[in-house]
Image (cartoon, helix red, strand yellow):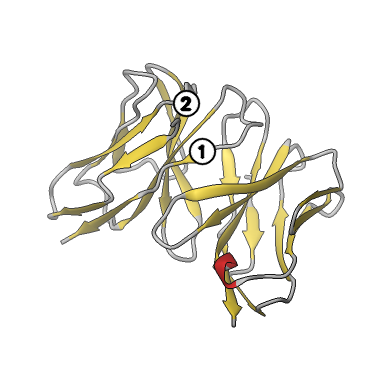
């Protein structure tokens, strides 16, 4: 079945760039998403990329998609302490009404 | 403001009791979802509904039940048959096609005492 994998932890210093990686198995994915979860809260959409795109930039966020390798990454420039959270990668396939989420990467930003 | 609301935020249940978690949305979304979140396991799909009066089992439906009598509401019942119900439960909704983002509620933390 479909699977989405992420590393569990990432620690960076304030001001550095963070890169969170994700791999997925469903080659028919239509959209790929990055969500952010703060402690005790729901998930908020950060950005998404359509599967026929290679890159998307949105202010401090850059998403790179390597469709051949089924690899997605989220780069956060100038990481701040407020960026500390869990980041989830997710994929969806048009028409299935299902989103598949990764395990989440806990980002810790050190002052 | 449009959004998706879960209640209560915290819920305690005695072993052997059923409990119902509420999820309401005013986004006019057709699809609604229930996920369970455990540490280190990400989100696992319990049930989802594409339209009123219809719903499908997700990956971990055993011990749970849902109903979808109204478009706005998708309550989840955690039954006594669920062996390990202590978890964080997230409700979400999305438009007709799954290539639109899913909007999430703030979650309900259920603890069995």
Q: Using the image, determine if residue A89 lies above or below residue B32.
A: below
Q: Nearer the viewer, residue B2 or B96?
A: B2
Q: Residues within 10 Å of mark 1 (few under 14, many from 20)?
A: many
Q: Secondary structure at mark 1?
A: strand
Q: Answer yes or no: are tags 1 and 2 on the same subunit.
A: yes
> Label for residue B27?
2
Q: Quadrant of residue B54?
A: top left
* Dot 1: chain letter: B
Dot 2, crowdedness within 10 Å: few (<14), some or many (≥20)?
some
Q: Residue at x 56, y 25 (%)?
A: B95
Check the picture and name the quadrant holding the N terminus of chain B.
top left
Residue B51 position, x and y percent, is 46, 18
In this rendering, position of residue B19 left or right of residue B27:
left
- Answer above or below: position of B99 versus B41: above
Picture coordinates of residue B90, whole percent (x, y): 40, 46
Give the chain of mark 2. Answer: B
Residue B63, label in figure: none
Q: Residue at x 31, y 18 (%)?
A: B69
Q: Position of residue B22 (x, y in %)?
A: 28, 36
Position above or below: A86 against A110: above
Residue A66 visible = yes
Is B14 on the left-hand or right-hand side of A104?
left
First of labels 1, 2 by sequence position: 2
Query: Is residue A72 in sight in this rendering?
Result: no
B39 vs B59: above or below: below
| Discs 1, 2 touching: Cβ within 8 Å | yes
- Residue B103 got which mark? 1
Alpha carbon separation for disc pair 1 and 2: 9 Å
x 56%, y 55%: residue: A36
- Report the quarter where the C terminus of chain B lies: bottom left
């Amino acid at each position: 079945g479909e699977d989405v994998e992420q590393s569990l932890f990432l620690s960076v210093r304030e001001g550095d760039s963070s890169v969170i990686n994700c791999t997925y198995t469903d080659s028919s994915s239509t959209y790929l998403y990055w969500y952010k979860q703060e402690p005790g809260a729901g998930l908020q959409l950060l950005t998404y990329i359509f599967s026929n795109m290679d890159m998307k930039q949105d202010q401090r966020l850059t998403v790179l998609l390597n469709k051949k390798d089924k690899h997605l990454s989220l780069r956060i420039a100038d990481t701040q302490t407020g960026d500390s959270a869990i980041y989830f990668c997710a994929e969806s396939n048009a028409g299935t009404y299902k989103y598949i989420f990764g395990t989440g990467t806990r980002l810790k930003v050190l002052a | 403001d449009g959004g998706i609301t879960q209640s209560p935020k915290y819920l305690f249940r005695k072993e052997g009791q059923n409990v119902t978690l509420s999820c309401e949305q005013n986004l006019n979304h057709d699809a609604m979802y229930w996920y369970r979140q455990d540490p280190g396991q990400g989100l696992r799909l319990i049930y989802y509904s594409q339209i009123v009066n219809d719903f499908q089992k997700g990956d971990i439906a055993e011990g749970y039940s849902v109903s979808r009598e109204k478009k706005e509401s998708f309550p989840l019942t955690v039954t006594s048959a669920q062996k390990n119900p202590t978890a964080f439960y997230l409700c979400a909704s999305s438009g007709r096609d799954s290539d639109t983002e899913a909007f999430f509620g703030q979650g309900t933390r259920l603890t069995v005492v």
